[in-house]
């Protein structure tokens, strides 16, 4: 594709260097997107091409952005200066692309915070945001759990994202969002081993109780069923806090168990039934000891609500 409309400079700041525009660009690249950003993220080569891996990553991030944009517009109807926290940010593909496509033109104090435990990734993302002139992006070298108490984050968080945040980091992101009373959560969980390990530990004891334990008798099934049950419990936990939950797939099934997209929108829905269901599922599967993870203190208080 011949590119006739060069990328617009970011409104919220000045870039250190003017962008080098390749003559031709992959058709996936949208008008106005920062070519320098895509090259720095190694999504685009210097001559404007995408390799197979980066095409998949870009497709995944675009797909997520398509779900997130309407939520951001909803928030803007209510107030300016959106706060988005991206947990387990990694190289911050999602944060950067979201900023480039949506946030950079807002000019209203909206901000994206990336939370990441790997110090070198935090440093690189901080440098890249500075280099690109993206002042509404910050990166914090904290675990998700630590960020819940961090004074570096504002009191109001509108939207929480977590794309493949490892193992229980997704659960910590849910806990963070519940404590911050975020309006929206967009979660693509990674493999979570905790529930599967409890199913495995109690297997011998549970096998005689009901034929349903056949569902997780074989080790491979323990892992897969554990992963599915984890997401079911997460959805019930969110519903039990008054959120409306939608579950769909991210893109194709090439990422198998890591391809589930959970979108939660706070609607103050009735909490009683999902709370009861959550407790019932935990008890039926012999997972009572996981109550701490999914049946939080807040939920115990909310249990009295309708
Ligand atoms: C699989 S990568 C995903 C990165 C990015 N979200 C993406 O999809 O490209 C998971 C990232 O989460 C980070 N991480 C894992 N556990 C974390 C925790 N408890 N708190 C913060 N970051 C965590 C890892 O260091 C890693 O960079």
Image (spheres, grey):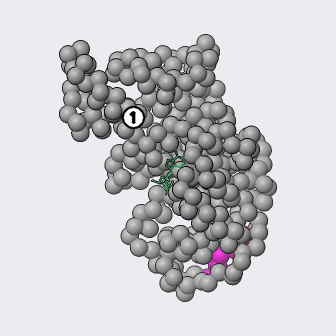
Tell me if 219 is positioned left or right of 52 in this view.
left
Task: Tell which of 207 and 77 is nearer to you.
Answer: 207
At 36% from the left and 52% from the top, the residue drawn is 255
In the image, is 60 to the left or to the right of 73?
A: left
Q: Quadrant of the C terminus?
A: top right
Q: Is residue 49 above or below residue 228?
A: below
Residue 6, percent from left and from top:
65, 79
SS for dot 1: helix
Which percent across, then down, holds residue 124? Answer: 59, 66
Quarter where residue 240 is shown: top right
Residue on which the image places disc 1: 194
Q: Is mark 1 within 8 Å of ligand 1?
A: no
**Figure check: 77 above or below 94:** above
Find the magenta span and give its range: 4-10
Residue 161 in sight from this viewpoint: no
- Based on the picture, tell me whether residue 5 belongs to the magenta stretch: yes
Q: Residue at x 57, y 46 (%)?
A: 143
Q: Residue furthest bottom?
A: 23
Q: Position of residue 261 (x, y in %)?
A: 46, 44
Q: Whole-percent x and y of residue 114?
A: 61, 53
Image side of residue 13 versus residue 284, left or right: right
Chief SS of the magenta region = loop
Camera sees residue 10: yes
Q: In percent of the image, x 45 and y 47: which residue is there?
A: 166
Up-down: is 57 above or below 214? Answer: below
Is 98 situated left or right of 28 in this image? right
Q: How many marks?
A: 1
Q: Does the segment drawn in magenta span residue 220?
A: no
């Amino acid at each position: 594709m011949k590119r006739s409309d060069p990328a617009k400079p970011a409104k919220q700041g000045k870039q250190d260097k003017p962008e080098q525009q390749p003559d031709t660009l992959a058709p996936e690249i949208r008008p106005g997107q920062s070519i320098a950003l895509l090259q720095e993220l190694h999504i685009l080569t210097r001559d404007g091409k995408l390799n197979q891996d980066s095409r998949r990553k870009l497709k995944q991030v675009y797909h997520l952005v398509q779900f997130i944009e309407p939520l951001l517009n909803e928030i803007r109807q209510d107030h300016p200066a959106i706060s988005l926290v991206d947990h387990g940010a990694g190289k911050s593909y999602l944060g950067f692309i979201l900023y480039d496509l949506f946030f950079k033109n807002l000019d209203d104090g909206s901000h994206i915070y990336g939370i990441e435990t790997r110090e070198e990734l935090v440093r690189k993302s901080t440098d890249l945001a500075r280099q690109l002139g993206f002042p509404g992006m910050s990166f914090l070298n904290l675990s998700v759990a630590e960020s819940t108490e961090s004074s570096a984050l504002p009191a109001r968080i509108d939207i929480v994202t977590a794309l493949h945040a490892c193992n229980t980091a997704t659960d910590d992101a849910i806990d963070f969002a519940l404590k911050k009373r975020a309006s929206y959560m967009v979660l693509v969980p990674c493999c979570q081993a905790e529930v599967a390990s409890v199913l495995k530990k109690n297997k011998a004891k549970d096998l005689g109780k009901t034929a349903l334990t056949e569902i997780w008798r074989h080790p491979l099934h323990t892992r897969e069923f554990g992963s599915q049950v984890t997401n079911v419990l997460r959805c019930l936990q969110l519903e039990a806090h008054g959120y409306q939950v939608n579950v769909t797939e991210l893109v194709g099934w090439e990422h198998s168990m890591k391809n589930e997209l959970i979108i939660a929108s706070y609607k103050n829905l009735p909490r009683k039934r999902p709370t009861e269901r959550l407790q019932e599922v935990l008890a039926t599967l012999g997972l009572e000891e996981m109550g701490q993870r999914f049946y939080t203190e807040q939920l115990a208080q909310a249990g009295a609500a309708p």
